[in-house]
Amino acid sequence: MDLFSPDPAWAKARIAELTERLNAANHAYYVMDAPSMSDYEFDTLLAELAELEREFPDYVSPHSPTQRVGGAPIRNFVTVLHARPMLSLGNTYTKADLAEFDARIRRLTEEPYTYVCELKYDGVSISLHYENGALVRAVTRGDGRQGDDVTANIRTIASIPLKLKGSDYPSSFEIRGEIIMPHKVFHALNAKRKEAGEPPFANPRNAASGSLKLLDPRQTAERRLDCFLYFLLADEYEADTHLHSLEKAAEWGFKTGSYYRECADIDAVMAFIDEWDKKRLDLPFDIDGVVLKVNQKRLWPVLGETVKSPRWAIAYKFKAQQVKTRLLDIGYQVGRTGAVTPVAHLEPVALAGTVVKRASLYNADNIEKMDFRKGDTVLVEKGGEIIPKIVGIDLSRREPDGEAYRFADACPECGTKLLRKEGEAGYYCPNDDHCPPQIKGRLEHFISRRAMDINTMGESKIEVLYEQGLLGTIADFYDLDYRTLYGVEGGEHAADGNRRVVTLRDRSVRNILAGIEASKQKPFEVVLYALGIRFVGEVTAKSLARHFGDIDALMAASKEDLLQVEDVGEIIAQSVLDYFAKPEHRALIARLKAAGLQFATAYTNERPEGVLTGTVWTVSGVFSRSRDEMKALIEANGGKVGSGLSRNTTFLLAGDNMGPEKRKKALALGIEMIDEAAFFEKIRQAD
Ligand code: IVH
């Protein structure tokens, strides 16, 4: 035996022992919320296990805690048919409806029954399959009939057992539940995204959904998702009641939560609902209601189901939380493009777990329509989204001499007189070159992921460098060097009240400079988008770059020339002309050119001939591949990707979580909607 390496038989046993101990510790921590070992001990044992596994790869168990995040990113999710359709639940919002649901059951059966009340987790439903106690497959709900195989991502969720406990589980079964993102994780994720210039998720549900659709399980692992299980489908296992299946599932290691309760009758159900309508604010995750299920499983086939939902269960949905408070004042925020958004300052009031001090008022039209007076008592609502909105005014409490609000005349940041363009709902500050939020906004836009993608910078660093006078225009990025950056220090009072302090030391300075250097390789169309010319989004930037080929041709273009470009109408053409008419902007381009940025492209607007030739597409929602990949597929097949829904759009490629407004608009314009499956079908005809 080699003196320095362990005996294989011993290693095999030790690997098995460590695997089991660490899995038990994980279960205690993530499922039971009752840690059984210290972080230090856990990390030490995990390191020992990983070391042994490296030396004896043959003994690695697929259930080892080291095997949660496996393999490389995948290219595509595989579609899987559900063995039994994943039904949804009927919704009610009133107790009268619940009483009717109960009365109906009594009409259908004379047998005694009870209910199990559960929380209605506000996440994404999932179906898990176990064979001989091991997790073999996890599938999203999809359209209820078929979903995506997301096993690799689901394995990264620490509260989902890879191997079940005990031995009395069925050899093959399915269990369904909800993937959620806890509030704490959600807020941290959004803060990080904001810092990186990425759009924040509107709510934890969208964040959970987006996280499951990531193609790289390592990224999903970072999202720290959680999962509650609430529905066991196992022919082999004869539980008489739903309550018993939940208890069994918990014994096998699933997280069923401790929130459910058996209720003897509908009155007890109502009491459960009232209790949770209050207590939900203290939960560390979102719920949007309560689910009640008939407990006695033999009644399920008697009560039956519709195509959409079972008749033995129903969801009671909580109303969006509302409170009344006083409107103290209306303030204004100036965005990157100079758009001025009105914000209501409210008397602080507790609502849905947070203290609300502000609400968005959208735009000037909305203010006129609502006709606010100073001191009005307003009704504030917080639904699934983070930012509360004002849904009404209590006119009975209006003071007779309250002053009406007029939209601000001048920019609150720089004092310039505001302008409103014909036909637009909002005002804007025209002082784009000297208004501070516009300057910072342009810098942030320039480094953002879809623009130059200088992810080593971020909002707070930009703020500090701007404060210190080191950054004023986007060309200044390329003058930064080690000596100027090293030791720079500063901070800001962020909107959340915390002061963020930035001190640049060796590592961050090197990172920043490397990020800036790498950005010089970004293609012309990206640079053009990054400039932040009003109305020139990614699609237009691409068209312009490919039409003119280089910046000199673009700068020399007349209005007629510009109008020749696809997607470019009067407004965009004028905006491009205005931009390049300014000597400052021409000087800026000259500096960026000297710094080595790309200002020419070999690509042209000519598209390959294909099945999609002649069609114009808008892409919206979440797909199994990134939106960029979907767009590239459209273009590769001869189609064109437009910048938004308009009369010229032929198809709306609709993914998951698409907003209802898009759908409405598409319907109104008579645009055909196509889902991912139908799209792939369409381009497959090409082969
Ligand atoms: S039971 C046949 N229980 O709500 C039973 N669903 O609106 C089907 N949900 O698709 C589901 N919490 O994603 C059930 N405790 C719970 C739930 C729950 C959340 C979700 C689930 C379902 C949707 C129906």
Image (tube, grey):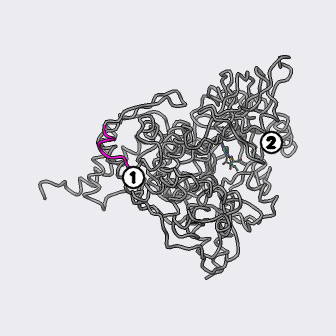
Q: Nearer the viewer, residue 142 or 219?
A: 219
Front residue of 19 and 459? 459
Residue 468 relative to residue 252: left or right = left
Q: Quadrant of the C terminus?
A: bottom right
Q: Residue at x 67, y 70 (%)?
A: 564
Q: Are marks 1 and 2 in contact (CB under 8 Å)?
A: no
Instruction: Provide residue 228's location: percent of width, then percent of height.
Output: 58, 43
Please tell me which residue is depicted at 48% across the width and 52% down the height of the picture. Answer: 588
Q: Name the N-terminal-most of marks 1 and 2.
A: 2
Q: Residue at x 70, y 75 (%)?
A: 614
Is residue 237 shown to the viewer in this render?
no
Residue 361, numbered label: none
Region of the chain picked out in magenta, as a range: 478-486
What SS does tag 1 mark?
helix
- Which residue is disc 2 drawn over? 111
Using the image, determine if residue 285 lies above or below residue 164: above
Whether residue 56 is situated above or below residue 111 in the rendered picture: below
Disc 2 crowd rating (10 Å Cα; few below 14, some 14-19, many 20+) is few
Q: Amino acid at mark 1?
A: Ile
Q: Position of residue 316 (x, y in %)?
A: 75, 38
Q: Which residue is mark 1?
A: 516
Q: Is residue 479 visible?
A: yes
Residue 53 in magenta stretch: no
The quadrant in which residue 260 appears is top right
Image quarter (top left, top right, bottom left or bottom right) of the N terminus: bottom left
Q: Quadrant of residue 249?
A: top right
